[in-house]
Amino acid sequence: MPKSQDLDEQLEEGLEDTFPASDPVSTTYTSIPGSAGHPPPPHKPLRSESHGILERLENSIRAEPIRAVGIAALVGFVYGLVR
């Protein structure tokens, strides 16, 4: 089994071969253009977005209940065909 000192020497040698001084590692790399140093924009909570969607759906159903029942029947029929 190799000694710890031998492993350390092998590691140092490998690092010296891998990272030459003429090619330093970048410390400011970002995969998103133009976002260096800027925090991401705040996001809205999902609860408020889903609440708004549900509210619009409810209003549509209340405005045209016959149409909503027809759509639900059609979805149920198609589901029954593919099941």
Image: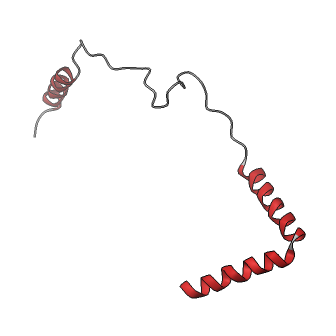
Q: Residue furthest top?
A: 22
Way the structure is coloured: secondary structure
Residue 23, how many percent across, how many down? 26, 16
Residue 49, how many percent across, how many down? 75, 52
28 displayed left or right of 41: left
Q: Quadrant of the C terminus?
A: bottom right
31 displayed left or right of 5: right
Residue found at x 84% / y 70%: 61
Residue 30, how many percent across, how many down? 46, 27
Query: Is 70 drawn above or below residue 9 in the view shown?
Result: below
Residue 29 sits in quarter: top left
Residue found at x 72% / y 43%: 44
Query: Is 39 drawn above or below residue 61 in the view shown?
Result: above
Query: Is 33 drawn above or below residue 58 in the view shown?
Result: above
Residue found at x 83% / y 60%: 55
Front-most of 32 and 37? 32
Residue found at x 80% / y 75%: 68
**Number of dots carrying numbers:** 0
Front-most of 77 and 20? 77
Q: Quadrant of the N terminus?
A: top left
Residue 59 sits in quarter: bottom right
26 displayed left or right of 61: left
Q: Is residue 83 visible?
A: no
55 displayed left or right of 29: right
Q: Residue furthest left?
A: 1
Q: Is residue 77 visible?
A: yes
